Image (cartoon, coloured by chain):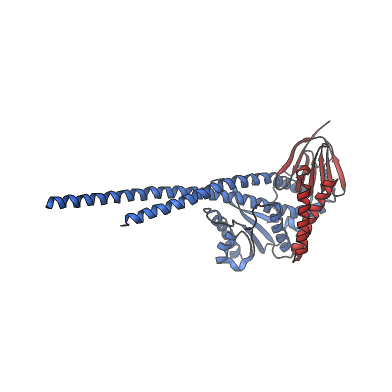
């Protein structure tokens, strides 16, 4: 099958760079499967899982997918391979975040804690599936 | 003329200082490797972001471009975001960033503009507050942050965008030090709002499909671009700081070595002179008998 260049980058590192035959991306209005020679396309992402060639799975939160003649580029605000996530550590982090949310005094701190908690919960949901 | 004991003490103290500077140099070298890797890992994201943004911006005509991209049309109030280190002892690293910022401030003030300063890092704040205290609107303290993450940059970006939306300033410029090599860091001023977009490569005018629509994507992409630019500046700064500290401490260590050599020579000379003097006294005493 035809392959196309695919890159998954987060601000902290490059998670995947190479050829892929099929990538599933959680776009804002539903999951999209990108194959080679896809029409130029750009979409915001929601929290979810990127699946590469039906094998490697990565959790992404926020960002953009950009399909052009040069291939698919996913710019994720946060991206973690699913097998690097430890469910126990994660549930501990969720508990901490819930505590932070309760303790937050200012609106700004509350919004930040809420955002963090939402991200963690989305990550938890991604592992469970 | 210092006594032998004074000289001995002086040599011992220089030796102790040399040990410290040597240790600091090695710590900086280890940290530099990590900071440099982080800065390099962040580059692909920032450059991809730029390419996507250039592509999008090319499709949006001048008048209905969002304010974050094109500015709000005014040029009166300038916000300077000055990123420096939290610690000193890193050569001219902090002062060269501050010097660049100061030149800009002075030329803006001379042109009758209003200047507001947002300091990131303690050192820059300390140097700027002497002359420009009433211009400084906020200080971001990153002392408690051990490992720089995107979260910190996002926090600063949110603050900056909030101020922009309230109409607190018209133009934002970011000051930081670009890391070129261990011995060369370049203080840089970079325009943040309106966005500086390389117009060169965005030429692929393919018929894009957007989901949701173009304007909406741009409105979430632009704040993120600011966060990414700040993040990159912070990482470059961290690498530059360690590089500057490494070479500063290397110089200090070498300097201490020279000082020890000189002092030891002086010590040996005066010891020798004393022995000779005593011998002469003994001999001339014996001759007198």
Q: Is residue B133 above or below residue B231?
A: below
Is residue B33 visible to us here? Answer: yes
Q: How many marks?
A: 0
Residue under the point 75% across and 44% down: A84
Residue, far right: A30
Q: Nearer the viewer, residue B48 or B182?
A: B182
The colour assigned to chain A within the rendered structure: red
In x, y percent, where is residue A54? 83, 37
In x, y percent, where is residue B158? 73, 59
Residue, far top: A1
Position of residue A16 in the picture relative to residue B38 (left or right): right
In x, y percent, where is residue A117? 79, 56
Residue, far bottom: B134
Quadrant into which the N terminus of chain B falls: bottom left
Position of residue B209 in the picture relative to residue B79 (left or right): right
Residue under the point 74% across and 65% down: B166
Is residue B64 visible to us here? Answer: no
Chain letter for blue, please: B
Q: Quadrant of residue B83?
A: bottom right
Q: Is residue B201 above or below residue B127?
A: above
Position of residue B182 in the picture relative to residue B55 (left or right): left
In x, y percent, where is residue B89? 52, 55
Q: Nearer the viewer, residue B250 or B1?
A: B1
């Amino acid at each position: 099958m035809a392959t196309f260049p695919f890159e998954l980058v987060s601000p902290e590192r490059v998670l995947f760079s190479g050829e892929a035959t099929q990538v599933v991306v959680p776009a804002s209005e539903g999951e999209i499967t990108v194959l080679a020679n896809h029409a130029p396309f750009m979409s915001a992402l929601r929290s979810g899982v990127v699946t590469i060639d039906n094998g490697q799975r990565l959790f992404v939160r926020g960002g953009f997918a950009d399909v052009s003649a040069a291939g698919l580029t996913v710019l994720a605000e946060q991206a973690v391979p699913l097998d690097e996530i430890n469910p126990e550590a994660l549930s501990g982090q969720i508990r901490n975040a819930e505590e932070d949310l309760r303790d937050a005094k200012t609106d700004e701190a509350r919004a930040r804690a809420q955002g963090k908690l939402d991200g963690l919960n989305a990550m938890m949901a991604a592992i469970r599936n | 003329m210092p006594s032998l004991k004074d000289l001995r003490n002086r040599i011992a103290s220089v030796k102790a200082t040399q040990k410290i500077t040597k240790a600091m140099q090695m710590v900086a070298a280890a940290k530099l490797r990590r900071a440099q890797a982080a800065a390099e890992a962040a580059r692909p994201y920032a450059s991809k972001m730029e390419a996507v943004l250039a592509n999008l911006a090319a499709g949006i005509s001048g008048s209905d471009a969002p304010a974050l991209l094109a500015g709000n049309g005014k040029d009166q109030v300038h916000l300077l975001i000055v990123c420096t280190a939290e610690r000193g002892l890193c050569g001219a690293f902090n002062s060269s960033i501050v010097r660049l910022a100061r030149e800009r401030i002075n030329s803006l003030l001379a042109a009758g503009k209003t200047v507001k300063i947002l300091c990131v890092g303690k050192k820059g704040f300390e140097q700027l507050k002497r002359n420009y205290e009433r211009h400084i609107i906020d200080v971001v303290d990153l002392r408690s942050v051990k490992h720089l993450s995107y979260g910190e940059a996002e926090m600063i970006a949110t603050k900056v965008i909030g101020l922009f939306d309230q109409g607190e300033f018209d133009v934002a410029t970011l000051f930081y030090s670009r890391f070129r090599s261990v011995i060369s860091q370049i203080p840089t001023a970079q325009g943040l709002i309106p966005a500086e977009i390389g117009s060169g490569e965005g030429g692929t005018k393919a018929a894009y499909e957007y989901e949701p629509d173009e304007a909406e994507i741009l409105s979430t992409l632009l704040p993120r671009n600011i966060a990414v630019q700040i993040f990159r500046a912070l990482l470059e700064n961290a690498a530059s700081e360690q590089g500057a500290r490494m070479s500063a401490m290397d110089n200090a260590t070498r300097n201490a070595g020279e000082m020890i050599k000189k002092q030891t020579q002086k010590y040996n000379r005066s010891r020798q002179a004393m022995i000779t003097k005593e011998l002469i006294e003994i001999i001339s005493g014996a001759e007198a008998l």
